[in-house]
Image: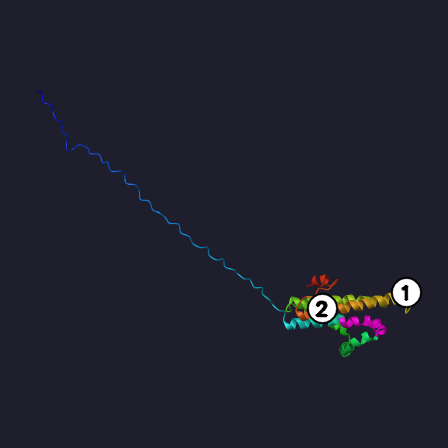
Amino acid sequence: MASIPFLRISPTTTTFNLKPPSLPSLRIIKPTYSPPHPRKLTITRMSYNPTPATDRLISTIAYTLPFFNSLQYGRFLFHQYPPLASLFNPLLPLLSLYRSIPYSSFVAFFALYLGVVRNPSFSHFVRFNSMQAVTLDVLLVLPVLLQRVFSPARAGFWFKVMVWFHNLLFIFAVLCFVYSVGCCVLGRTPYLPFVADAAGRQI
């Protein structure tokens, strides 16, 4: 009987690793929630720089120059309305002192223009108000010069025109004085019509 040879498996026979491949470990990242940071509110405070008292005082005094020179235009109103003249009686001592100084208008004019307006040591507030007062004073002097040149008659139509014009100039000058002094006392810059632009160009 023929012998059937047995198959031998050599110990060096390759063995198959049937282990499943190892998967990479997955790292589970937990979502983190951070509450939003509250916004910081920055409060901006406006810097308030009040006008010094000396600047307000000098600016107020500067407007007395055109005011004193404008009182001559109110003589017709004072004659027509005597109670109106009584309102200005407290100013008579100051006006008398002002008129007692020779060439007081010219002295005050050049003192303001050369000593204050052209002096950089003063603040812009003082220089602008002084220049505005000087400009207003120049405008108030021009009608007087025109009156001396043309010398209108003491009666008639042109005399009435001159009276109306003087009354309007006086009212305008008083309103400018009250408004300017009130603004200067409060530390605000007054802007007079027909005057402020011309004064601002000279600063």
Q: Mark 2 belongs to which amino acid?
A: Ser
Q: Who is closer to the viewer here, 191 or 148?
A: 191
Q: Who is closer to the viewer here, 1 or 139?
A: 1
- Residue 144 seen by the camera: no
Q: Which residue, given by chain and number where applicable, does mark 1 sit on?
A: 157
State the image quarter where residue 105 is shown.
Answer: bottom right
- Magenta stretch: give its range: 67-81
Say which residue appears at 70% left-offset and 70% top-offset.
Answer: 182
Q: Secondary structure at mark 2?
A: helix
Q: Who is closer to the viewer here, 109 or 126?
A: 126
Say which residue appears at 69% left-offset and 62% top-offset.
Answer: 200
State the image quarter where residue 192 is shown.
Answer: bottom right
**With respect to residue 14, does 94 lie above or below?**
below
The crowd level at tag 1 (other Cα within 10 Å; few <14, some 14-19, many 20+) is few
Q: Which residue, given by chain and number where applicable, does mark 2 sit on?
A: 180
**Prevailing secondary structure class for the magenta stretch in the rendered image:** helix
- Residue at the limit of the structure toward the right, as seen here: 156
Q: Mark 1 belongs to which amino acid?
A: Phe
